[in-house]
Amino acid sequence: MFKKKCKFKFRLLFLVLLGILESPAAQAARLKDIASIRGVRENQLVGYGIVVGLKGTGDGKGEMTAKALSRMLEKLGMKLDNKDIQSKNVAAVIVTANLPAFAKAGNPLDITVSAIGDSGSLQGGTLLQTPLRAGNDQVFAVAQGSVSIGSDGKEMHLTSGRIPNGGIIERDVQADFSGRKMYRLNLHNPDFTTAARAVLLINKELGGIYASAKDAGTLDIVTPFAYENKGVELLATIESVEINPDMNAKVIVNEKTGTVVIGDHVRISKVAIAHGGISIKVGDEKAKSGKTASSDEKMGVIEGSLSVGDLVKSLNKFGVSPKDLITILQSIKAAGALHGELEVL
């Protein structure tokens, strides 16, 4: 055994793919976790508002803030000229929120408030009632409440904050799923193998040929007669189907953290590696021992294995630094011996 000269240690992580575990169920993922139903999504809301009650950290003489405050006061029955409004306790903000699918009137929303003027801090401020609009310019919610910066404000981003449950949904999001004749699912990571497996398992679960793959990322499901006007029950059944998702062979290395993530399908051809005082032979079944050309040179043998994971483990034993590992993997890739994608972060 050779003494390790380098103090770096790699954290080797393996992506759990098809065939890496003895139990297929242990690696399966529910369809609901790897795909989404077309039409079931969040909607972004945005609005322009005013935060008041600041301790001298507002926009000051900002013309935009003065006009907005003047219009608001006018609605409350007080008419003032913009020149009469010069307060450092007021800030103009953009208010954003995500409207969940199937949202109903009266449900609360978490709100994010961000300064758009020269305000130095929103800490301690209160957002006045602000309508929030969707992309079609319709108002779906209103927001109001105390802005929370977090902690005591030290070393925090003071010009942005949140209002938990600060919004109230004003109208229902219409989406009739119960009576549909067909549903479409989109895979988060399109893959032909995963799509084909999903079709087979869905048809097996439904007891007929109801699912088909439009492409590597799109699945169409025709509503069976037994599930007519029962779209919720049908989607609940489909979402629970467990699938072994497939992935492209990929190696990801992060030089800063020394992390190496290797897919199970990544392989390398028979190759000999010499880097500094280290020599490694991969796939040489005849070589049974390692020899050193000098007292400083290290020789290792991976007998008959073509796994990149085994190679990294062997290099780790010899004390190879993250920088050297990245160089070695890049060289193997350049030589055409690494069969998979190499991504360096």
Image: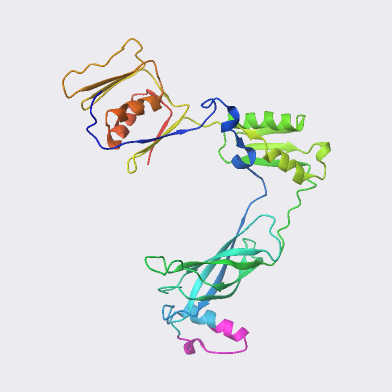
Q: Which residue is drawn at 47% across and 28% down?
A: 264
| Quarter assignment of residue 328 | top left
Q: Position of residue 230 (x, y in %)?
A: 80, 44
Position of 135 compared to 300: left or right?
Answer: right
| Quarter assignment of residue 206 | top right
Q: Position of residue 189 (x, y in %)?
A: 55, 38
Magenta part of the protein: which range? 70-86
Residue 166 position (above or below residue 332): below
- Of the pair 193 and 306, the residue shown nearer to us: 306
Marker count (numbered): 0
Residue 343 position (above or below residue 180): above
Position of 227 compared to 56: left or right?
Answer: right
Q: Is residue 198 magenta-colored?
A: no
Residue 154 position (above or below residue 245): below
Q: Where is residue 43 in the image (x, y as percent from the top left)?
A: 62, 57
Position of 185 compared to 115: left or right?
Answer: right
Position of 254 compared to 248: left or right?
Answer: left
